[in-house]
């Protein structure tokens, strides 16, 4: 059994993503959770590159690792939550949560058992993930949602500023 | 050689299912509201991964545009969510969700 480079990369990235995801859930310190979540996001960006979605990989790193995770880290530092004294749920709730999540995972993965495995020996168009093609689709077929997302951003900005402001007496 | 020639689509769906299940597990398992928001991000990323995989295997760029929009919505969601969290912290001096049980039956 000899594996190609792509398969080895897929395996390494998947295992790293899964294990850092486990550390996100189970680490006691929220700062460590954020750092492990960044590792997970980089692994997912590596998967995007393997799937020929280079533009999305770049955007993913910029948006998630660059913006969202900095926001999380900033809030944790500002609220001074980087202690390990967080109360945990009672044991029976934790066991129930693990069983429920495990069953959901098992059902989702097990439903793939009968599916036929698809690989494309001859890809028709392998450069759909490049910025030119994606931009063409975004600004022709998806122009209205693109413009609407700007309204969404404006309302989110106004909402977060209003929510974060100190209450005026 | 790109991944769509060697790796079956099933593996990507299985990976995204595992990541999604881990996000659900984190939401059920933790009491810290920040960790719960982070697990929601993990679930969104699992869905993104499966959308990109489907779009690559079907040679259809619409899936990747969807992922682009999901990222935009996730950024807005995190901004509003963290603002709500700061307001909760200001009122209860904690981010523990067990203090927020007024709407619970």
Image: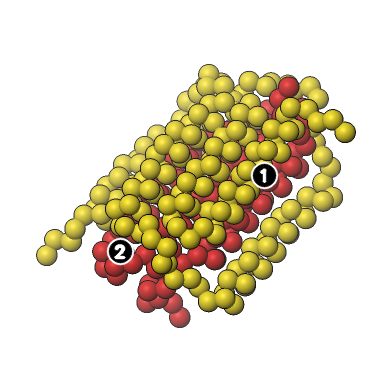
Chain letter, yellow: A
Q: Position of residue A117 (x, y in %)?
A: 82, 39
Q: Residues within 10 Å of mark 1 (few under 14, many from 20)?
A: some
Q: Is residue A87 something that shows in the picture?
A: yes
Residue most toward the left? Answer: A169
Vertical position of residue B45 compared to residue B62: above or below = below
The local secondary structure at tag 2 comes to helix
The chain under label 2 reads: B
Question: Residue A15 has which mark?
Answer: 1
Identify which residue, A24 or B12, lies in the foreground. Answer: A24
Q: Residues within 10 Å of mark 2 (few under 14, many from 20)?
A: some
Relative to A91, B82 lies left or right: left
Quadrant where the C terminus of chain B sits is bottom left
Q: Which corner quadrant holds the N terminus of chain B?
A: top right
Question: Looking at the picture, does residue B94 appear above or below residue A34?
Answer: below
Outermost residue, front direction? A84
B37 in relation to A154, above or below: below
Are the residues flagged by discs 2 and 1 in contact, CB closer than 8 Å?
A: no
Q: Residue furthest bottom?
A: B105
Give the residue displayed 71% in from the left and 38% down from the top. Answer: A11
Residue B57 seen anywhere in this rendered image of the structure: no
- Dividing the picture into quadrants, the one containing residue A69 is top left
The structure residue drawn at horizontal position 50% and vertical position 29%, both measured from the top left corner, is A58
Q: Which chain is red?
A: B
Residue B6 image position (x, y, % from top left): 78, 30
Helix or strand or loop: what does disc 1 sit on? helix
- Residue placed at 31% from the left, 42% from the top? A154
Q: Toward the viewer: B62 or B85? A: B85
Residue on which the image places disc 2: B89
Inter-mark Cα distance, 2 to 1: 35 Å
């Amino acid at each position: 059994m000899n594996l190609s480079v792509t398969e080895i990369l897929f395996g390494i990235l998947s295992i790293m993503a899964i294990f850092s995801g486990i550390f996100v859930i189970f680490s006691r310190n929220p700062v460590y959770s954020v750092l492990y979540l960044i590792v997970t996001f980089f692994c997912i960006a590596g998967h995007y590159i393997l799937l020929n979605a280079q533009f999305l990989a770049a955007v993913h790193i910029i948006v998630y690792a660059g913006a969202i995770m900095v926001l999380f880290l900033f809030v944790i530092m500002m609220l001074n939550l980087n202690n390990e004294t967080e109360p945990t749920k009672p044991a029976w709730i934790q066991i129930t949560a693990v069983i429920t999540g495990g069953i959901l995972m098992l059902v989702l993965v097990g439903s793939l058992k009968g599916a036929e495995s698809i690989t494309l020996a001859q890809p028709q168009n392998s450069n759909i993930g490049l910025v030119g093609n994606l931009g063409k689709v975004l600004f022709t077929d998806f122009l209205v949602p693109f413009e609407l997302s700007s309204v969404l951003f404006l309302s989110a900005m106004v909402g977060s500023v209003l929510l974060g402001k100190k209450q005026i007496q | 050689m790109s991944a769509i020639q060697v790796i079956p689509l099933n593996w990507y769906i299985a990976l995204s299912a595992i990541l999604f299940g881990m996000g659900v597990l984190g939401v059920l398992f933790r009491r810290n509201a920040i960790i719960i928001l982070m697990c929601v991000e993990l679930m969104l990323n699992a869905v993104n991964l499966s959308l990109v995989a489907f779009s690559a295997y079907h040679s259809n760029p619409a899936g990747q545009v969807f992922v682009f929009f999901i990222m935009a919505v996730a950024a807005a969601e995190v901004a509003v969510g963290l603002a709500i969290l700061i307001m909760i912290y200001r009122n209860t001096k904690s981010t523990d969700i067990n203090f927020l049980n007024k709407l619970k039956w």
